[in-house]
Image (cartoon, helix red, strand yellow):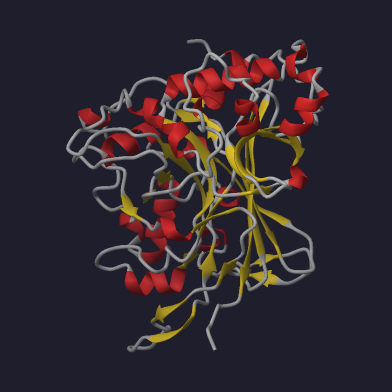
Amino acid sequence: MPITANSPSRKSWLDVPTISDFPIQNIPFGVFLTKDDIVTIGTRIGDYAIDLGAMQQLNYFEGIDLTDDMFMQDTLNDFISDGKKTWRLVRNRIGDLFDNTNPKLRDNPVHRDIIIFKMEEVEMQLPVLIGDYTDFYSSKEHATNVGKMFRDPENALLPNWLHIPVGYHGRSSTIVPSGIPVHRPLGQTLPNGETQPVFGPSRLVDFELEMAFITTDANIMGETIPVNEAEDYIFGMVLLNDWSARDIQKWEYVPLGPFLAKNFASSISPWIVTMDALEPFKTKGPIQSPAPLPYLQQKGKHSFDINLEAYLMPENSESLLISKSNFKYMYWTMAQQLAHHTSNGCKVNSGDMMGSGTISGPTPDSYGSMLELTWGGKNPITMKDGTERKFINDNDTITLKGYCQNGQIRIGFGEVSSKLLPPFIRH
């Protein structure tokens, strides 16, 4: 089935700013609260939120096999469970209805008032009920930098890293949408030069510039997903700031890996951009050497050219661009990650989220964390107000942005932006 929604020549009858992340070719999916306090599934074109629940009630999806309440729910899980054919039919239909040559909705002011909201009139919610969350560690540059800092620089990458997409199971209960503030975590750390740990606020809170993909129901328990089929089970992608407490992490991660240093908060952008929308931006990833084992081998283009930016804004000051990276630097692809994840028969469900791991590029200005950007605090970043940052201070705001651009269209993710607050302590 062709992806007609992607036609680069298509224009919408809705006004779309020239550099919008959300032209008619994007059609992402999300969940929002309307000004009437109704939670609905929606999409976005330009600076307008579109109520898909209202569109379904008004029969605009006639002929597409959907359950009666498909878009009148508070999560996208059921829609995602319906699979790729349904996602494509719905995106194509939305593209047709908002095409500037189609009068059906354009010339119906009563329906337009029910269906279309300005973005400032809605409140974005978490788009899916995330049952399970896995975070990978798939940027070679990031893994090498961390290895140099924490271990022998000559053996920065551990022996298994070039053979498997390394990952760990995170925690979904503390994944929040953009705009929700995050508290500095308390935890155990081992101060420099000490032999006994102390308990208190983390002093080395960091961001991690990541992306994540959302899956559909992929397999039954015990079943593996072949790498050449894995992309069919990926619904779309979001920006991910996987907050980290580096001092807690350093003390706790041996022998089992990340735990409380990571699970206190992860922030995501609220619009899921579909893999169909990202199709024009497929590109080749890095050459994998040594060649992966047969079950992970791929040919062709399986990565995506997604420009990424990280900004740090102190309270009462201006925002500073501190990193520019790109998703195409990832050593392991999403299909390889999903194939490996299920290679032991692990069951993957609709709404599960898989983080890429920190996305660092080859140059110092493309590193995806404060740990790397300041090289463990040795090279502080000077902000526009003259203050310095080794890590993130209370009341600083971190904003991540991402977009794809070619000669014809720009497809973006909006942003994930969150403020770091002091510790939340009950009195």
Q: Position of residue 4 (x, y in %)?
A: 59, 13
Q: How many marks?
A: 0
Name the residue: 39% across, 82% down. 190
Q: Is residue 258 left or right of residue 114?
A: left
For the residue pair 389 and 173, the one nearer the viewer reads as 173
Name the residue: 37% across, 88% down. 194
Q: Is residue 361 above or below residue 149?
A: above
- Which picture quadrant has residue 152? bottom left
Q: Position of residue 318 (x, y in %)?
A: 79, 61
Q: Quadrant of the C terminus?
A: bottom right
Q: Position of residue 229 (x, y in %)?
A: 32, 24
Q: Is residue 308 above or below residue 98?
A: below
- Which picture quadrant has residue 9? top right
Q: Is residue 231 above or below residue 415?
A: above
Q: Is residue 407 left or right of residue 147?
A: right
Q: Position of residue 198 (x, y in %)?
A: 40, 87
For the residue pair 328 and 212, the one nearer the viewer reads as 212
- Which picture quadrant has residue 78? top left
| Residue 26 visible in the snapshot | no
| Residue 185 visible in the snapshot | yes
Name the residue: 62% across, 21% down. 59
